[in-house]
Structures are given as structure tokens and as C-alpha cells.
Image (cartoon, coloured by chain):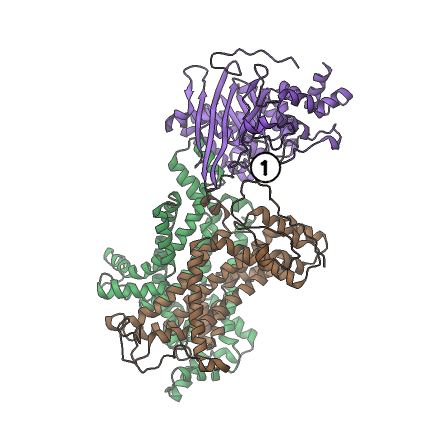
Chain colours: A green, B brown, C purple
Amino acid sequence: MNWWVKRTGQALFTIWAVVTITFVLIRGLPGDPGDRIREQAQRHNPDMSQAALERLIEARIPASYDDPVHVAYWEYLTSVMRGDLGYSTFRRAEVAPEIASVLPWTVLIMSLSTALMFAIGLGLGALMAYKEGSRFDTAMTGASIFFNSIPYYVAAVLLIAFLGYRLSVFPARGTHSDATDPGLSAHFIFDALYHATLPTLSFVITGFGIIALTMRGNSIQTLGEEYIRVAKLRGIPDRRIALRYVGRNAILPMWTTLLISIGFMFGGAIILEEIFQYRGMGWLMFRSIEHNDIYLMMGTFLIVTIAVVIALWIADATYGWLDPRIKSGDDSESY
Amino acid sequence: MTVNRTDEPSDDEPGSGDAGSRFDGSALFDRDTDGTDREYRADGGQSAGGGQMFSDSEFTDVTMGQRLSEVFYQSIYEPFVVAWEDWRTKVGLSIISLYLLLGAVAWVSTSEFLILDRITIIEPARGDGPIRLAPFQDWSYPLGTDMIGRDLLAAMIHATPRMLQMILAGAVFATVVATVVGTLAGYKGGITERALMTIADVLMTIPGLPLVIVLIVLIDPSSPYLIGIIIVVNAWAGLARTIHSQVLTIREHSYVEASRTMGIGTPTIIRKDLLPNLMPYILINFTSMARRVIYDSVALYFLGVISVNTIENWGVMMNIGYENNALIIPEVSHLLFVPMVFVVGLSFGLILFSQGTDRLFNPRVRARGSGSTKSKDDEEITTGGGAL
Amino acid sequence: MSTHETTVTDGRSHSVSDPILEIRNAEVVFEMDRGVSRVLDNVSLDIQRGEILGIVGESGSGKSMLASSTLDAVVEPGVLSGSVTYYPEEGDPVDVLELSDSELRQLRWEEIAMVFQGAMSSFNPTMKIRDHFEETLEAHNYSLSEGMSRAHELLSDLYLDSERVLDSYPHELSGGMQQRTLIALSVILEPNVLVMDEPTAALDLLMQRSIISLLEELKEKYDLTMMFITHDLPLVAELADRLAVMYAFELIEQGTTEEMLQNAGHPYTRALLNSTPNLDAPLEEMRPIPGSAPDPVAVPDGCSYHPRCPLATDQCVATDPPSEPVTESHLIDCHHWEESIESIPLNHQKEATTRTTDEERNPMDHQNQMEGER
């Protein structure tokens, strides 16, 4: 119980810290914000008209900029807590609902990729460990390393080029086809999954390798444990040993990998969504950058971070339930 | 100057089970340590290491040179010999060296420093060739040319030094900050520990890329060093945490206790006991940080988050290819694929290297692989004893 | 030195009257990069039904291999040859090395069970103790309710709070509790033979003591035959009916505990006895054995102990001494055992003749002194 309180406290603290960082970033950069924006905008786009520049500066500098820092901070903090993330000049709407409307798509490809990546990685890794030293093991080790060394966005580009355009097997763009109406129909779900295929594959192909290799190492280590030998002598069926003994004890340390990959994939989703023009958080973030829409940009950053904090909190909570050693012991190493 | 050493070859009995492959290092590297005849086991065996660790914490008058050579030996040379046995380390290091060579070639070619000014091995890419030449067609442009006739190979090579600067800055920054924070927290304990680890925890939870994007948009950096550092702005946190827990483990070890009771200060202990032990681990994380810088910087250039005009970069070229529909038009697809090959190549080299060195930390995997038999009967050597 | 019981030897030349386990010419070989490693070398041994047999040897002398051999459980890539025969109370002898997988599965734990050193590493860290017991019963198709009530009884016999222990995870138990729990787990299927490999190695002295006495109680109650493997000679001497000494993967001497303590013939056994720390003996008389145990790849020719033996002659270098029956129960593998008895004095015997007080100090001493007085 104590552990729970602590962990939840840590999650809340992190969210507060991130909100503060966002505030500092919006407000605390050195120099006159107007000059900075002007200089930056001109570098990127020398032909920008004076009027457009002024509009841009106005849009990017919050109204409360003249308030003393503590007042502005308090105002920011309370409005974020109310769910008010500001007004998006580019979308001409409140930031929060805009983000809410695209968030599910990011979560969809994220969870699909994570699930597939771990399923393939864990299975393959365990198989490689059982066949340690065989030709299969060597070949798969090589393949895992090779695929792991391809950046996910390179894989995305290749997938678009070959499966998307050349062969036209999967759609290369978008979250769903225009013809399909969003809703809980089987047709729509299938269409959404169909569109999610290539982004998901980009993650899975480039990510399963490291999981397989780690799992292989863990399994080999677990297979060498004394308790496996004792269990065999006790006549425990092979199947049970594979699942309950080797599997469980080899997978547990992978929780760290899962935690890290959640954050990594949320970050990666931002890049992938831009490449696939997939209308999720990342796509929105890039639009905000393109249009110098600072509230929208900070809003997406904040929401992505909070999503990761929550995901980690859930994962951590589950870990305590999976590994009996964590609950009773100290909370020292959940990472 | 006399040096008290206790690190005699700790197990030189002819019959000690794992006499395996030994490497006599004294002839090569240990000249200045007054000829103590040390043996280093190429398999990094624990018993030999144990002996040495003790000698390190011993309060002895050792010259700077001796200490440096010792640190070098323990933390770099010995692990290296172990890692080198793995094919992955060899291939990985060769690939990395190749890129360093490319960087050096480009640097020499553009340098205006004294004599180097006159040497130009490969001209920087200029738009004077045929347009959109495919790779492997004309050997004066082996990798083809882009939309305005720039030689892709030259462009690739001349992007390398910037890339390496960025990688170096990022990896050095991350490993140094992580090591300092991790060791300090682990050793000091108390409030320092709690504060530093809370910061690390918070930073660790923040997804890296969005933060990096936000920072780059707001700061708009152009120096490759700064870009490298921004990319790892929170990546060091995970490493610091791991180093912290490693320090905690090492802190339990008796030899640190021993040096503490002998009245040796914390900084000395960290420098002489902890860091040499953590060195291999830090080196490996250095490569993973490097990989992260490559991935993220190329991605950010590719998508135009970092201003394209400022720096040549593989990602910039991918961006040019992408903008010119290289995905759809097969004739220009090399604009996209050539830089990709360079990115994947370097990343592959780094991964191979760290996979090869992985065995330094996973002795169990190593033991199983080499078919060692001494697993069961390995209790300490006592004949009788005890029960009275 | 004449008080050994006479044993009846049948046609198969057993050193005991009613063997439950008979090991003949057992050999374990590992193929290694450096060459072939023989970690068990032609060991023949009988275990008497209902006895406690102590196997003593240094680290790396092959005693764990001998333990694994009794269950045909030598870890790969080791290859076991020779023969191991199990004699059930009723029915035909079982050739352990010829059993099919399912027969072997039945033999293990139902007939012969094993306790390993390091109890912590013998349990699955993510499974409750109860699951360990239940899965074992289920795997062997034993009645779960009967089995679990036996588990409760066993744990209580071992002075454990059975309910609490069963509901714990391994890491929640202390070292001594884990070891006792492991012993309970190994006899849960009521085996006839219990092989114990350094069961007390990781425990403190008090805990070692109490486990030893618990084992004696357990043996009486459940009618067990025990093979107790250790490096700790005084510890096992208290418990065992017979002792066997291993050196360099061979059995070099065996006999009743009395014979071994009073009339050990092999110079190594005598050195082992003298190297034992003893509160009564002055420190200068405690002698560590000079030299070290041989490498399994390069065991010396002839008698493997000759490089360390003070009595070694050309004969020892040239030929491996055969087992010589000094009495029917006492076998010595040494060319010069008579000379050894004469020229290597045993510390505890010297003492026993010079001192007669302090009988409470140590049961082993106590026994020695009794012998000396006789």
C-alpha cells in the first residue's frame, strides 16, 4: 500500500514538473520574445510580410506575459488543471479538444506496435535460447541485430515506397479512408487497422530485435538457474517449466524494457505520424511547429508526457503484482 | 619509489581448473609499474580481478603515470581484450573506424589549417555534375548525383564530420552527466541522493523526442555540438539511474568498506574504486547514446525540424529526396536510399559493438558459451573446518 | 581398532549387507576445448539400506557429480557411464541408467530425492512454497489432499510454522527456513533414499547443528537412507554410519565411521583428519594439506594423490592403486596404507591419549576419546 502511495505521488510530481517545465519553456527563454520570434521567422521565411510577422508575434506571446512570474505561473497551473491548454491559432479552436480528437489514433498504433513487438520479440527470444548455438539461433541473432539497427523512420520510408506505392498493398497515408464513417462498425475498425498496418510494422520490424536479444539472454540465464534443474528432477512437466519457470522469470526483467519503450514509442510516433500523415498527436505537433502555434505545440507535448506518465504508472503497478519480490521488498528497482 | 602491491598472480597453480587462455600483459603495457609480474586473464576471470581491486584501494604512493596506466589497463584494456574475442566487436569496431576515417578525410579536405589547406582528398559536393544520375553508372559519381548535379558520395562524406561532432557532443555530455549524477547520488546518499534521483526519475518519464523537438523549435540551434546535447537532454537520466544502482551494489563490496575504514575520502574512493569498475558499462552506454543522437538528429533533419539550411547532414539529404518525391519516382529514389545506407551502416556498427561487449556484463552467457565445466563444484576451498 | 561389524558379502562383492543403491564404475566425462575432462573416475560404491553414508571431499573432487549420478542427473554436456542399480524393498533391481524418460521421472523424487546446496536457488522465486509442493504432487499423480497434509506434518516436524511457510514466497524465508523447507519438499513423495549435496554449506554453525539433528529425527521417522555429501568432515562424522572419501574424482577410501576416524589408511584421509580445526588441538598441529587438487583435464598418472603425498614412491607414480579391503567394510586405495598408519600420527589420537577431560567439547572428540580409552 505504501508503495502505491509513493508511486502515485511520484507520478503526480512528474506531471507537475512537466507542467512547470512547459511554463518555463514558454516564458523563460532569454531575450525579448518578440525579437526572437521575428529573427527566427525571417531566417526560415525571408519573404514574410511585416503584418504577418506581427500577427505571428502576437500569437506566440501569451497575453499574460506582462504579469509577474508567480502570477502567470499560478494562472498557467490552474488553467492546465482545468483542462484549458490555451487557444490554437492555427486550428482556430481550443487546444484541449483538438488534442483529444487525435489522441486515440496515437494510442492505437502505440498499443498495436507494443503488443506485436513484444509478442514477436519474447517468443523469438525464448526460441533462440532453447536452441542456443544452433544455426537458427545464429541466423536470428544476426537478423535481430540488423533489423534493430534500422531507424524506425527509415523502415517507414521503405515500407511506404514498396508496400505502399510500388505494390499498393497497404495504404501509405492517413488513419482511415475518407469513404468510411468513423464509428463502431466492423468495417470502420477493419479500415482503421488496415491503415495502421504500415506505421505499426515500422515499429515492429525495427524494434523486435532488441527485445528478442534481451529475452534470449534472460532465458539462457534462467535456464542455467538451479531451480530449473531441481524442477526437472522433481518431474515437473516440461510445459510448466517452460511457462511458469523459464518464461516468467525471464520476462520479468523485461519490464524495464517495456517501460523504456513506451516513452520511446510515443516519441517515435511523432515522427512516424508525420511520415505517414497519420492524424495523431505527432501529426498535430508538426502542424503546430509549421504554423508557429506555440500553445498547440506545448499542449501536445504536455499531453504526450502525461500519457507516458500514466502508462508507466500502470506498468509499474502491474509489475508489483507480477513479481512478488517487489511488493514486500523496498521499491528500489522497478526500473 | 617503492610500491606496495598485493596483486601477485592470484591463482597460478598449474591445476586451477580454469587456466584457460591467459594473456601476459606485463610485457606490453605494464613496463612502468616496477616490473611486477602480473598476469591478466583474457577471460576477465573474477579471481584475478578481485586481487587487483584490492590493490587499488590500497594506500600507496603511486605516480600519476602508474595510476593512469593502471586505470587504462583495468577499465579499458582488459575489457577490450575480452570483448575483442567476439566477432561482433571486431566487425562493429571496423565499421565505426571506417566512419571515423570518412570524417577525417572530409576534415582534411576542407581544413584550412597550415599544410592541410593544400590537401584535398575529396572535393566538397558542388552542383557541377550531370543531374539525377543514378548510383553505379558513372564512376566519377559512384553514388550518383542529386537534382542539381551534386555528387552524392562527396556530400555524404562531407556531412560526416558534423555528424561525428554531434554524436560526440551528445554522447560525451550524456555519459559525463550521468556518471557524475549517478556516482554522486549513489555515494553521498541522503538528501543529495533523493534529490538527484527524483530529478532523474522525472526526466526519465518525459518522452525524449517531443521534449527535444520543443527545445529545438524554441532554441533553434545551429551548432552541431548544441544539437547533440539537446538530443540527449534527458537521455542521461536512465543511465544515471543504472549507474546509481551499480554504485549502490559496489558500495556494498567489502573493498570499498575497507578503503573507507582506512580513512580514504569519498572522492578518492569514487575515482579509484568505483569508476574503474563502472568504466566498461559507461563505454557501452556511450555507444547507445551515440546511436540515439544519430537516430534523432537524422529524423529531425529529415522532417525539417532543424533548419535545413544550416548544416549538411544525411537527414537533410533524405529530406531533399523526400521533398522530391523519391518515394514515388524510382529514378530519384537513390536520393533517399543512399543516405539511409549511411545511417543504417553507422547504427549497425554501433549495435554490433555494444552487443559484442555485452558479454562483459553477462558472465553467465559467457560461461555457458565457452563450455566451462566448473559450475557446481565451485564452493570455496576448505578442507574440513567449521563445525566446532 | 577391531570393533567393526562383520558384513555378509554376497556373490556380487558388496561392501554392505543389504544395498539399496549400488554404483559400479561410474564415470562422468566432459568434452572441453582444453581436452577431455573426467570429473568422476571409476567410482564404485554401495549404500546400505537405512544407513547414513557421508561422502567427504574437497571442492572440485567430484562429489557433486557422484550425487547427480545417483539420479542420472549429470548436467550436460557431461556424459555418465557405468552402472547405477537401485534395489527397491520389493521387486526387481532397477538399472537407473537404462530407464526411459518416464520411468526416470518416476524414480526421481518418488524413490530417490535430492537436496541441493543453496536452498534459495532451488526454489522458483516467483512461486509460493505451496505451489512447489502442489505441482510436485500433481506431477507424480499423488493425492493432493493427502500430500498436502503430509507437507504440513513434515514442515511441523522440521519446527516450521507450516501454514505461514506454505503461503510465503521463497525470498520471505530465512536461509535456515529455506533449507528445511527444501528438505521437506524433497521427502514429500516419501522417497526411500535422500541424497544431500552440501545441505548445510550456506548456513551458520547453529543452524547446521540443528539441521543435522533434524535429519536424524527425519531419518528415523520416515525410514530414510541418506547420502550426505560435504566438505565438512567433523560435521558428517557425527551423523554418518559410514564414510567415504573422494579425492581427484575418485573414491580413495571407505569404511565405517569408526574405522575411518581411528584407522584411516589413506595418507589423504589422514591429512584431512589432521587439517580439521579442533578446539583441543594446539594450532601448530593443525596442518593444511600442501598443494592443491588436480585439474580434471590433467589428473596425475598413477595414484592421483602422489604429487602431494609424503609417502609417494615410484610405484605410486606408475600404477593406480586398486581398492584393497583391509576389513570387509574398509577399503583403501593406497599402496602404502600400512606405512601411512604408522608414520602419519592423527592429532586427535595423540590428544586422546594425553588428555581425558573436556568430554563435552565435541561429539566427535568425545567418540574419539572413548575409542582411545577402550
Number of numbered markers: 1
Q: Which of the two residues, C142 or A143, is positioned nearer the viewer here?
A: A143
Q: What amino acid is at disc 1?
A: Ser
Report crowding for label 1: few under 14, some 14 to 19, many 20 or more residues within 10 A (C-alpha): few
Mark 1 lies on a secondary structure that is loop
- Whether residue B365 is situated above or below residue A42 in the rendered picture: above
The residue depicted at 68 percent of the width and 23 percent of the height is C364
* Rendering quarter of residue C322: top right
Farthest-out residue, front: C314
The chain under label 1 reads: C
Q: Position of residue A265 (x, y in %)?
A: 40, 60
Instruction: Check the picture and name the quadrant holding the N terminus of chain B.
Output: bottom right
Given residues A177 and C192, the one toward you in this image is C192
Q: In the rendered image, is residue C48 in sight?
A: yes
In the picture, the quarter occupied by the C terminus of chain B is top right
Residue A158 pos. (x, y %): 30, 64
Q: Is residue B192 left or right of residue A297?
A: right
Give A84 or B320, whichever is nearer the viewer.
B320
**Residue C142, image x, y percentages:** 42, 25
> Which one is nearer the viewer's eye here, A15 or A285?
A285
In the image: residue A122, left or right of residue B275: left
Q: Residue furthest toward the bottom?
A: A50
Hey, which quadrant is residue B199 in on the image?
bottom right
**Horizontally, is C252 left or right of C88 in the view?**
right
Mark 1 highlights which residue? C174
Residue drawn at (72%, 55%) of the image: B263
Judge left or right: residue A30 versus residue A136: right
Residue A54 placement (x, y as % from top left) = 42, 85
Please say whether residue C142 is visible from this viewpoint. Answer: no
Q: Where C298 sits versus C347, above or below?
A: below
